[in-house]
Image (cartoon, grey):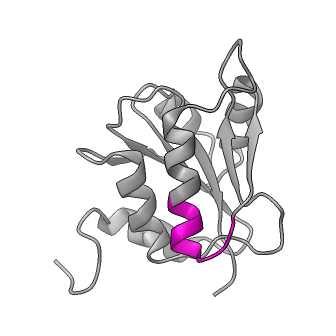
Amino acid sequence: MLKGLDPLLTAELLFVLQSMGHGDDIVICDRNHPAATIAAKTTHGELLTLFGADIPSATRAILSLIPLDTFVETPVLRMKVVGDPDRVVDIHHAMQQLVDEVEGRPIGIGALERFDFYEAAKRAFAIVQTTDAGPYGCFILRKGVL
């Protein structure tokens, strides 16, 4: 245990966050996401898991160490609801409130269709899967500059 660090942050996740550069993406997803399959295609190449963590807790822990990108309009992306792309579910609202609070400014959250999200996730640095039940708890965070 390290003093001052959120206990959800594993050694491997700390290594990944340190290794990421500005403009790199990290995916935070629920347990329904095909995370292991997609993680194999990421820069890190292996799935990171935070068992017992929900998406807001995992996101808060990660954002306690990295800033979101200020050079793009939407440093956070989410998956659209299949069949109802304009619908915003509870986890989308919760993440909006969380990122605005943590960053101390309004944060733009973009939305991608399911398969476009999967393709974007493959280009991410890493994927962090939580045990959040979802659904549609799939987010991409773009790391900014410290």
Q: In the current view of this chain or complex, which residue is farthest to the left?
A: 1
Q: Is residue 44 left or right of residue 10?
A: right
Against 101, residue 145 (above or below) is: below
Q: Residue at x 58, y 34 (%)?
A: 38
State the quadrant of the C terminus: bottom right
Residue 100: x, y in percent? Answer: 59, 66
**Position of 50 relative to 135 (above/below):** below
Taking depth in this image into account, of 24 and 80 the one nearest to the observer is 80
Residue at the extreme top: 83
Does the magenta segment cover residue 20? no
Q: Quadrant of the N terminus?
A: bottom left
Query: Residue 99, located in which quarter of the rendered image?
Result: bottom right
Residue situated in front as seen by the camera: 32 or 81: 81
Q: x%, y% of residue 27? A: 57, 49
Q: Is residue 110 left or right of residue 50?
A: right
* Tag count: 0
Residue 6, percent across and down?
28, 72
Q: In the rendered image, which quarter is residue 114 located in?
A: top right
Q: Which residues are magenta?
A: 98-106
At 21% from the left edge and 87% from the top edge, which residue is drawn? 3
Query: Does the magenta run of residues contain 104?
Result: yes
Name the chief secondary structure element in magenta.
helix
Is residue 16 visible in the rendered structure shown here? yes
Q: Is residue 126 visible?
A: no
Name the side, left or right, on which 95 lies relative to 70. left
Image position, residue 63 (x, y; %) = 49, 70
Q: Residue at x 26, y 44 (%)?
A: 51
The foreground one among 113 and 12 is: 113
Q: Residue at x 35, y 36 (%)?
A: 132
